[in-house]
Image (cartoon, grey):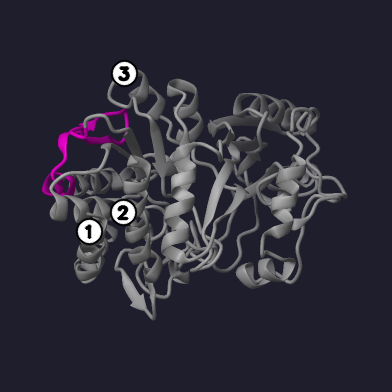
C-alpha cells in the first residue's frame, strides 16, 4: 500500500501545510517560565493529532517542567517496533527586531516557510505525523509497530528526560529509533548523521564590589568585573585557536581513515561556509580542515555576556557583577561530566584575586556514534535514495541531541538520524525557515522508510 499512502500525502499537501502553521503559531519556548502554558498547549495539540491518526495509549508523561508525549500503535504482529523521537519545544526568538516577519506567525516567502521551530523541530515532527496519517488513512494499519516519544525540553538539554525513561522503561523498549532533527546537504542531496557532538553548557559569574560604583570615584582602583570576565574569556583559546583547558583533549577520538575519506567526498568547501554564514573567512583550530572542525573536533563558544549598562546614552558605572554563558561541544570519548569539571577548575585558576568567580554547570549531554550498517540506518539510506534520487553522504554532525546516547545506553537501541532540514535554515537564529519541498518530500521519504524497515 506504499503507493496509496504516497498519493494521499501528495493530495493533502495543503492541509499538511496549514496544520504545520497551526503548531508553529504556539510559542512553546521551553527555557522561559512565562511560556510554560504555551509549551503544554503545543503538547496537547500534538496529542489531539495523534488521536485523530489512530494512535493509542496516548499520554503526557509529567516532569518537573514540561511533559513528554507518548503514544503507540502495536498491532503489526511479527514486525519490528520503531520508536520515533522528536521535540515540540523551541528556542527563544531574541533578538526580535532582526526577524523580517513575526517569529510565531508562519510566513511563506517563495518555497520557504519562516517561523521559530519550523525546521527545529516542529516541521520535522510533522513529517512523521503526516506520514503515519497517510498510511493509516489508506491502509488502516501500519507496516510495523510504532511508538512515539516527543519531548518538550530538548532545547534546554532534555534535563528531565532520563527520569522519564527510568520510570517508564517498558514503554520505550523498541528495536530501533528514528530521529528527524538534522539536515540534508542540499534540497536534493540527503545526509545521514552517524555521530553527534555532546554538550556541556555553563554559566560564569564574576563579582567585584558589593554594588555598582561611580567610575570617576573608583575607576582605576577597583577591578571592573566586566573587564575581568573578558580577560578570563580571552584566555580560553591560545594563538592556534586551541582550547586551553588542561586535559580537555586527552580523550578526543581521532578520525578513522574511512571517516576522513568520507569527509573528503563531502561537497562542502570553505566557500560554502562563507556563503552559508556570511563570514569573510573560516576560523578555527589550527591543523584541521573546516570539515573536521564541524563535527569531529571539540569546541568552546561564548553565547552571551551580561553586565553593566547597555541602554541608550551613557552611564559611567563599574558594575558589581558580570555573567557569561559558555558551552563546549564534545566529541566521542569525551563526557559532559568531565568537561564540566575541567572547565570549572580552569576558570577558577584564571580568576584574578581581585574578583570572585562562580561557575555553574547548567546542563550537558555526552556525544554519540551511530552504527551505519544497522538495518535501521540502511533502510533510511534506501528511502532517501528512492525519494531524492541520490545516495546519502554520512557525516559526524556538529550539533547535539541528548536523547541519542541515553537510548543507546539504557536500551542498547540503534538510532537512525534522518533529517530533512537544510544548512541555511538558521536554526536558533532570527528568520528560521523550513524549505517546503523538503517537508513534502520528507513525508514521502518517511512513508518509504517505514515500509523498508518492516521488510
Residue 337 position, x and y percent, is 61, 24
**Element type at marker 3?**
helix
Residue for point 71% across, 53% down? 263
Residue for point 44% across, 40% down? 376
Q: Which of 153 and 374 lies nearest the eye of the viewer?
A: 374
Residue 442 position, x and y percent, is 37, 60
Q: Residues within 10 Å of mark 2 (few under 14, many from 20)?
A: many
Nearer to us of marks 3 and 2 is 2
Q: Which residue is mark 3?
A: 167
Q: CA distance from mark 3 to mark 1?
A: 36 Å
- Is 36 left, or right, of 416 in this rendering? left
Q: Are marks 1 and 2 in contact (CB under 8 Å)?
A: yes
- The disc, 3 or 1, on the residue closer to the chain's N-terminal end is 1
**Element type at marker 2?**
helix
Q: Is residue 413 above or below residue 385?
A: above
Task: Say if residue 248 shows up in the picture.
Answer: yes
Amino acid at each position: 500500500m506504499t503507493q496509496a499512502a504516497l498519493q494521499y500525502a501528495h493530495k493533502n499537501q495543503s492541509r499538511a501545510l496549514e496544520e504545520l502553521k497551526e503548531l508553529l503559531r504556539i510559542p512553546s519556548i521551553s527555557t522561559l517560565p512565562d511560556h510554560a502554558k504555551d509549551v503544554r498547549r503545543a503538547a496537547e495539540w500534538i496529542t489531539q493529532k495523534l488521536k485523530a491518526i489512530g494512535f493509542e495509549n496516548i499520554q503526557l508523561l509529567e516532569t518537573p517542567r514540561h511533559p513528554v508525549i507518548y503514544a503507540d500503535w502495536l498491532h503489526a504482529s511479527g514486525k519490528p517496533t520503531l520508536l520515533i523521537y522528536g521535540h515540540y519545544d523551541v528556542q527563544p526568538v531574541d533578538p526580535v527586531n532582526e526577524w523580517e516577519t513575526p517569529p510565531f506567525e508562519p510566513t511563506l516567502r517563495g518555497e520557504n516557510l519562516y517561523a521559530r521551530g519550523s525546521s527545529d523541530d516542529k516541521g520535522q515532527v510533522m513529517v512523521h505525523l503526516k506520514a503515519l496519517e497517510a498510511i493509516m488513512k489508506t491502509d488502516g494499519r501500519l507496516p510495523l509497530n510504532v511508538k512515539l516519544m516527543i519531548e518538550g525540553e530538548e532545547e534546554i538539554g532534555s534535563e528531565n528526560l532520563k527520569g522519564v525513561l527510568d520510570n517508564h522503561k517498558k514503554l520505550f523498549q523498541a528495536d530501533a529509533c528514528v530521529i528527524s532533527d538534522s539536515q540534508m546537504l542540499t534540497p536534493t542531496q540527503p545526509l545521514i548523521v552517524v555521530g553527534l557532538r555532546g554538550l556541556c553548557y555553563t554559566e560564569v559569574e564574576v563579582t567585584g564590589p558589593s554594588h555598582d560604583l561611580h567610575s570617576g570615584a573608583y575607576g582605576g582602583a577597583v577591578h571592573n568585573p566586566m573587564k575581568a570576565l573578558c580577560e578570563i574569556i580571552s584566555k580560553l583559546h591560545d594563538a592556534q585557536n586551541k582550547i586551553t583547558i588542561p586535559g580537555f583533549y586527552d580523550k578526543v577520538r581521532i578520525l578513522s581513515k574511512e571517516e576522513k575519506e568520507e569527509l573528503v567526498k563531502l561537497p562542502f568547501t570553505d566557500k560554502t561556509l562563507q556563503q552559508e554564514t556570511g563570514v569573510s573567512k573560516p576560523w578555527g583550530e589550527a591543523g584541521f580542515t573546516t570539515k573536521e572542525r564541524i563535527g569531529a573536533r571539540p569546541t568552546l563558544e561564548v553565547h552571551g555576556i551580561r553586565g553593566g549598562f547597555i541602554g541608550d546614552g551613557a552611564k559611567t558605572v563599574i558594575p558589581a557583577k558580570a555573567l557569561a554563558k559558555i558551552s563546549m561541544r564534545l566529541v566521542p570519548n569525551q563526557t559532559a561530566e568531565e568537561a564540566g569539571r575541567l572547565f570549572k577548575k580552569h576558570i577558577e585558576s584564571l580568576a584574578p584575586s581581585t574578583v570572585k568567580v562562580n561557575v555553574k554547570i547548567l546542563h550537558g549531554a555526552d556525544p554519540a556514534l551511530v552504527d551505519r550498517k544497522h538495518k535501521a540506518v540502511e533502510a533510511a539510506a534506501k528511502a532517501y535514495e528512492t525519494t531524492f534520487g541520490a545516495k546519502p553522504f554520512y557525516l559526524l554532525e556538529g550539533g547535539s541531541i541528548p536523547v541519542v546516547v541515553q537510548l543507546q545506553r539504557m536500551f542498547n537501541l540503534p538510532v537512525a538520524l534522518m533529517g530533512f532540514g537544510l544548512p541555511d535554515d538558521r536554526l536558533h537564529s532570527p528568520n528560521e525557515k523550513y524549505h517546503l519541498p523538503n517537508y513534502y518530500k520528507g513525508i514521502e521519504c518517511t512513508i518509504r522508510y517505514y515500509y523498508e524497515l518492516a521488510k
